[in-house]
Amino acid sequence: MSKVKKPVLVIHGDTCSYCQQPLSSNLTRLNVPGDYMVSDIAKVALVQKSATVTWQISSLKSG
């Protein structure tokens, strides 16, 4: 198994609301509303401040 040294974002849709969960230092899980009755679009950006890299995630509907 190899290690990825860059940030990885895994996105999946479900009936729940947004949920962002860091799983390890470089792996983040994002659950977005993806049910046929609930649709939303996420705005995702990778933000780097010094040596720290974070995901900036927001809903285009609710901000």
Image: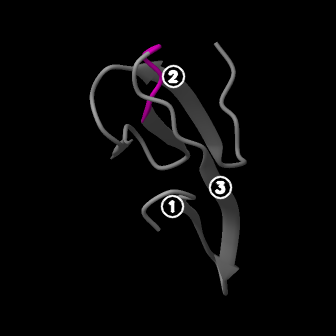
Find residue 50 and report its horizontal and vertical position in percent. Answer: 67, 87
Which residue in the protein does label 1 denote? 58
**Crowd around label 3: few <14 · some 14–19 · many ≥20 (10 Å):** few
Q: Residue at x 48, y 22 (%)?
A: 34
Three-letter amino acid code of the residue under disc 2: His
Three-letter amino acid code of the residue under disc 1: Ser
Position of residue 40 relative to residue 49, above or below, is above
Q: Residue at x 50, y 31 (%)?
A: 39
Lower sequence index among marks 3 and 1: 3
Position of residue 10 relative to residue 41, above or below, is above
User: Would you say residue 5 sits in the magenta stretch?
Assistant: no
User: Would you say residue 33 sits in the magenta stretch?
Assistant: yes
Residue range (magenta): 32-36
Find residue 62 and report its horizontal and vertical position in percent. Answer: 42, 62
Position of residue 17 relative to residue 58, above or below, is above
**Crowd around label 1: few <14 · some 14–19 · many ≥20 (10 Å):** some
Mark-to-mark CA distance, 3 and 1: 7 Å
Which residue in the protein does label 2 denote? 12
Determine the residue located farthest toward the bottom in the rendered image.
Answer: 50
* Element class at badge 1: strand
Horizontal side of 38 relative to 47 (left or right) equals: left
Residue 44 is marked as: 3
Dividing the picture into quarters, in which one does residue 47 lie? bottom right
